[in-house]
Image (tube, rainbow, N blue to C red):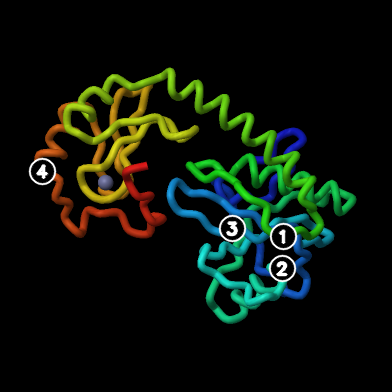
Amino acid sequence: MSQAGEPYLYHHNLDKGPAPARPDLSELEFLCAFEVNFIVHSYVHALYLHRSAEADAAWAVDLEWEFDPGGRPYAEAALEAVRAGQAQLKCLVAVRPLGARRSAMRFLLERELGGCGFAAMPDKFVAAGIAGRRDYMRLYRKRKGQWERKKALVANRRPAIADAAEELGLQPRACGDLGWVANCPGGRHLVFLEYESNSFKCPWCRRHGGAEELRAFAAHPEVADGERAEGVPPAPAAGQ
Ligand SMILES: [Zn+2]
């Protein structure tokens, strides 16, 4: 998926080859840590840079908000959690070497903030490494601006199926740049309402269709255990 100027070797959200082999933890340089809001759930995203002759890569450790660094710097506490098997180290992006360390930092951090996507928004800055608070805030404001523009666009494109969701008491609403959502009849999470196809979709209950299917789903919301998707991320809670 290499595009001009975007020399991706690996990207966790794109359909790419296998992730690079996990580097030795001692080879990781701390980029920075910041909070990410995932609808109602937030966590701390600690980012590291790994450089080799073949690639510059961003690796991340996600820590639940209850995580207590115990007075240690985040940079160390997060890797301690990985060593102790309490957190995972995950490759986010690997690109061809970008030259200077700061160019690599800016490129990878901007891709990560821009690509937080799927309802996740970067939020408060937590700890500085190669990227300081000013580096982060500049990229954060850019991302926030894009998000606000997309949000305004989404609010103006209410899918007609939202009427059916409204009648059913499912509280359809515009949800940031995620698009329109409603409470899922099948559980404490959201269904996605799509404007172009005028349809709903619940990846967790594996149900989709038009207004009639949504009414039928609401009338019989039971989902057989075997039908419910496995291996999906925790569904965002409804009611936001
Ligand atoms: Zn569902």
Q: Name the residue rendered at 20%, 26% in the picture.
A: 164
User: What residue is disc 1 on?
Assistant: 127
The nearer-to-camera label among 1 and 2 is 1
Check contact, mark 1 vs mark 2: CB within 8 A. yes
The amino acid sitting under disc 3 is Pro
Q: Name the residue rendered at 15%, 45% in the picture.
A: 221
The amino acid sitting under disc 4 is His
Check contact, mark 4 vs mark 3: CB within 8 A. no
Label 4 and label 1: CA atoms lie apart by: 48 Å
Asked which secondary structure carries label 1, the reply is strand
Asked which secondary structure carries label 2, the reply is helix
The nearer-to-camera label among 3 and 1 is 1
* Lower position in the chain sequence, tag 4 or tag 3: 3
Label 4 and label 3: CA atoms lie apart by: 40 Å
Check the image and name the residue furthest to the front: 71
Asked which secondary structure carries label 4, the reply is loop
Q: Quadrant of residue 88?
A: bottom right
Q: Quadrant of the N terminus?
A: top right
The nearer-to-camera label among 4 and 1 is 1
For ligand 1, tell me if the residue under mark 1 lies within 8 Å. Answer: no
Q: Position of residue 106 (x, y in %)?
A: 78, 45
Residue count near mark 2 (Cα–Cα under 10 Å), binned few <14, some 14–19, many ≥20: many
Image vertical order of residue 191 relative to residue 80, above or below: above
Q: Is residue 123 left or right of residue 231?
A: right
Which disc is residue 75 wearing?
Answer: 2
Label 3 and label 1: CA atoms lie apart by: 30 Å
Q: Is residue 182 left or right of residue 88?
A: left
The amino acid sitting under disc 2 is Ala
Which disc is residue 220 wearing?
Answer: 4
